[in-house]
Image (cartoon, rainbow, N blue to C red):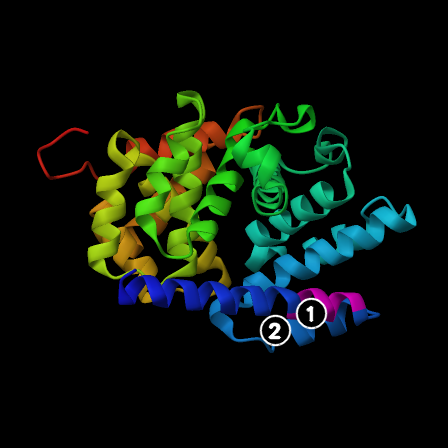
Amino acid sequence: MTMAGDEVAARMTKIMRIFIQGQSIAENGSELVLIGKQLNEIENEYRSVAFEAASMAIAISDFESGAGLKLWSEFNKKYGGKHASQIHSGLGWAIALKGISLTDILVNIEPLMQYRVADGCGYYEGIFRQQSALKNKLIPDTYSKYPEGYDQGIGRSVYYSAKGDIEKIPGIINEFPETRQADLWRGVAIACVYVGGCDEKMLNRIFDLSGRYYKQLQVGAALVSRARHDAESVTPYVESACKIWCHSTFSEVIAITSKTESATDSADGAYKKLMNAIIQELSPISTGIEK
């Protein structure tokens, strides 16, 4: 593994620590305001991770008390402006952990965020139920209506499992049916850009390894750019991914995501429409080689 790969692995370890910290804050807290205050004291770069963990813990508490996501909805309403993607992903963790029907829960979730909930379910399955999710490649019936989100989460789990050894990734993804591989690569991209630690050489190598799915790397970089912009936690790694994968500046990518989100309606298939719109708007690859 390269030195950059070691850096990626170290950052993943830090993310796990912050996740556990955020979960503990929520489990031991009594009021959302106090929970939020403690979460906001966590290092800004990965603060959204703490909110994701807290979201999971609060949703689990709601499920166990029969509260119908009352506290979770209040938590999301209060802090979702900055951490929407992670808070909805945390709900997905809770759904997967407790074996709750995803379809029943998503009735009251806005369409674009439904797929981030499914993403959280996929990530959980890929990390904690590897036999069925990664080896047997099963998609539980409860997730089958949201394959783009679920497999995006599986892709994130693949990146985390590789722990910075990016050469392992294509071999894992290529074992999946071809119809699932684009979503898996987008998940890899989201995890890669959010975690950070990749130098330009690694980013270029991931681009090459993605082959004809390189556009999913662009979408992943755009989605993370928007999430980090909202959370006010932009990193040089995000800017590098915009430059190398999208041939655009961070500001240009944010303008594109804002434009495409506002133009995407709230009907079924909103997330897929958003991804396609981002692909259409992003600068074309300027290598002269269509992958």
Q: Quadrant of the C terminus?
A: top left
**In the depicted view, which residue is nearer to us: 258 or 271?**
271
Q: Main secondary structure of the magenta part?
A: helix
Residues at marks 2 and 1 touching, judged by CB atoms closer than 8 Å = yes
Side (left or right) of 98 relative to 234: right
- Counting from the top left corner in percent of width and height, residue 75 is at 72, 58
Between marks 2 and 1, how big is the CA–CA gap?
Answer: 6 Å
Hey, which quadrant is residue 211 in on the image? top left
Q: Which mark is residue 84?
A: none
Question: Taking 139 as reference, is 176 left or right?
Answer: left
Q: Residues within 10 Å of mark 2 (few under 14, many from 20)?
A: some
Q: Which residue is mark 1?
A: 36
Question: Depth check: 52 or 278 in front?
Answer: 52
Mark 1, secondary structure of its residue? helix
Q: Is residue 186 in the magenta section?
A: no
Seen at 61% across and 73% down, the residue is 40
Percent of width and height locating residue 25: 72, 71
Q: Quadrant of the N terminus?
A: bottom left
Q: Which mark, residue 40?
A: 2
Q: Amino acid at mark 1?
A: Gly
User: What is the magenta range?
Assistant: 21-27
Q: Height in image: 147 above or below 78?
A: above
